[in-house]
Structures are given as C-alpha cells and as structure tokens.
Amino acid sequence: MVDLKGQYAGIKDEVNLSIQEVIENTAFINGPKVHEFQNNLEQYLGVKHVIPCANGTDALQIAMMGLGLKPGDEVITADFTFAATVEVIALLNLVPVLVDVNEDDFNINIEALEKAITHKTKAIVPVHLFGQCANMEAIMEVAKKHNLFVIEDNAQAIGANYTYKNGTKVKAGTIGNVGATSFFPSKNLGCYGDGGAIFTNDDDLAHTIRGIVNHGMYERYHHDVVGVNSRLDSIQAAVLDAKLPNLDSYNKARQTAAIKYSKAFEGIESIITPKTVSNSCSNICDTCDCHVFHQYTLRLKGVNRDALAKHLNENEIPCGIYYPIPLHKQKAYADERYNEADFPVTNQLVKEVISLPMHTELDDEQIEFITSTIIKFING
Ligand SMILES: *Cc1c(COP(=O)(O)O)cnc(C)c1O
C-alpha cells in the first residue's frame, strides 16, 4: 500500500544527517531537533502552537484532557473512522456518540451531527478522513450555536487546505479549538516509528497541554494536574524535520496518482471514484490542495469485493478495506442507544469501499497495471 523504501531513497542524505546529529549530541529526549521541528511545523501550518507527543491516539486523548472534558460529557464523532478516535473518548469515561457520514466525502454528516446534540454534548470530533477536510465551516457554526468544543482528528489530512466560502484557505487541523495528528510511518507525514502532535491557536490551552504531556508539570516536580508521559523522541523529530520540506510535493504526488487512477476508471459504471467536495472545487484537480489522498478509496457497485481483493492479491497488488465494520457495530462501542436506521450511509459504505495502493512513489506503469487489472476483472 505504501513504498517507504522508495521514498527514503530520495531523501537518504538529509534524513541520515538529521538522525546523525541527534546521535552525536545525545539529546535523545526533548532535544533541539524536537523544538526545530515544532517551530517548522508551526510555520508550515500557520498555527501558533504545535505540541509534539508520542502518537496520534495520545494527541487526541491529550487534546480532550486539555479541554477539561468531564466523565459523562457526550462527544460526537463519525461512525466511519479508525477506532482510535472513539477509543480515547471511551477511555476518558466520556460518552462517545457516533453519527452517520456523507456518501460523497466519507466525512461526518452535518444533519446527523445536529440531531445528536443533547444538553450533555460538550465536543465534536470531526475526522478528516482519507485526506479531505470535513465540512468545517458548518461544523464551527453548529459548535458556536451550541457552545461545543471542536477537536479535529487530522491524522489523515496533514497539509490539506480547507477553503472557506469567502475563499480564505487554512490548513486542516488548525480550525477547531484543537487539532490532533499522527506521524505513523504510512501517514502523509510519517516518521520511522511512532509520533504525533497537537495544534492550537489558543495560548491558554497550549500551556495546559504542554503540562499534561509532561506528567502534569508546569514547574519542575510540581504536579498541578494529572498528566501523562507522551513525547516525540528526538530521532523521530529529526526524521520529520528532514521530511517536512517535502510534504507539499509528497501530497502533490499522491494527488497526481489519484487523478490518473480516476481517469482510468472513467466510464466504468460499477466504480465510483473519490470526489472532492471543497468550496473551491468539485472534482479532483491538480490546482488545489483540498484533498491529500491519504487513501484512494473506490466504492464498488454490484462488484464482488472479496473476489476482486483476492484477484488483486493474486496479481501482487495490495489493497485495503478501510473500514469493514462501522464503529457502532464494534463490540467495544455498540450501544442500545444506537438505531440502525440512523446509519444508512456507513452501513452501505463498509460493504462497498476498497482502497488502492497510494503513496508518493507510484509511477505510470504501476497505475496502469493496477487499473487495467481491476477493469479486466470487472469486465469479466
Ligand atoms: C492513524 C490514525 C489515528 C491514530 O494515530 P496513531 O499515531 O497510530 O496513534 C487516529 N485517527 C485516525 C483517523 C487515524 O487514521
């Protein structure tokens, strides 16, 4: 699904040098590389504060701790996402409230979101799934109206732009009260191990969070709140700092591959290719950056998905099913509050979706082989 070896070959010298610096100065924990990367990412995102941490799941959890959410508070998120989003809500004894998504962008549905709000609702966690922002303008309006926090799960959309109706562009993850991301190796900006970060423009929240990631300490050995130990280690920061200057070109390479995939599938009625639903464009194009294609996900209509996946594997083409089960049907998160009739889209998507290889090193020959193998299978 990804080609980290191929990507490394293109940045070997920068990455090796950056790691070497950490080893030579032995500042393995909270070393200068962590601060350099933090500053560079703040600049790139146009956000006041980046707080690095150990992984994306921690980033979400710490963001929720920082906002002072209390046991019993309801937190609304999408039914169609990776489990980490809902897991941290449950771990903090908050009440996860899962809602349906849209067919066209796989992101949280605004009507379903509004319908799920109660007097106990305290926060919304939009997930920018597969590389495209949820409808943040509408989400922020709903949040303002009901006085709710917004925590963006930006693990899959780092570098994507969100365009407001008035044309203003901002980076994904910097719109809500707080954003959380992951630097897991296969993410759009990945390190060589685990890593994550929290973003915010709120000075007080940033201060609170900096203490939480460091055992609740604001002054050495004074523990004012219950915190955690969640650090981005210096070697991972060194890798990320070397890769950050390439993030835009990496995302562009993903977009170019997506355009080629979609072009090859044009006119095939049983395949629905991914759509871009931003205010600035209605289709995948190479002039904007509103979709950074963490995944390139097709919807199949009347095609035997398991048979296609098997056929692809036999041809040594990897593929993935993200996600095969809606969260509201997972044992850990199922709840009698949920009514099947409220999840028509997720229940449908889990049966239809299939994700194709998507990374920065896909070449024309690979794309041609993948698409022709799929088309031949479908045409029988
Ligand atoms: C990857 C991912 C996470 C978790 O990130 P980790 O670094 O693996 O903990 C959270 N949410 C979404 C949507 C993700 O894709």
Image (tube, rainbow, N blue to C red):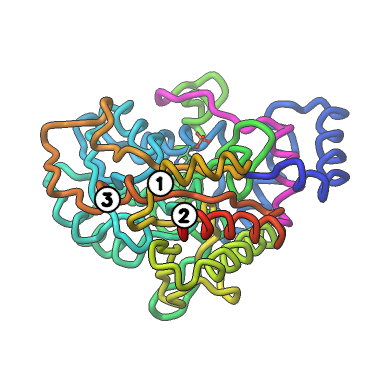
Q: How many marks?
A: 3
As rendered, which of 326 and 158 lies closer to the eye? 326
- 359 sits to left or right of 56: right
The residue at 45%/49% (across/down) is: 354
**Label 2, on which residue?**
297
Residue identified by numbered label 1:
305
In the rendered view, tell whether residue 121 sits above or below residue 260.
above
Span shown in magenta: 224-246
What is the CA distance from the residue labelled 1 to the residue labelled 2?
Answer: 13 Å
Q: Position of residue 363 (x, y in %)?
A: 72, 58
Q: Is residue 42 left or right of residue 300?
A: right
Q: Amino acid at mark 3?
A: Gln
Which of the two discs, 2 and 3, labels the residue nearer the N terminus?
Answer: 2
Kindly identify which residue carries mark 3. Answer: 348
Mark 1 vs 2, N-terminal side: 2
Disc 1: residue Cβ within 8 A of ligand 1's nearest atom: no
Which residue is at the front of the view, 168 or 98? Answer: 98
Against 267, residue 204 (above or below) is above
- Which residue sits at x=11%, y=36%? 337
Pointer 2 with pointer 3, Cβ within 8 A: no
Q: Secondary structure at mark 3?
A: helix
Residue 219 to residue 268: above or below: above
Q: Is residue 66 visible?
A: no
Q: Marks 1 and 3, how far apart in space?
A: 13 Å
- What residue is drawn where x is 36% and y is 39%? 324
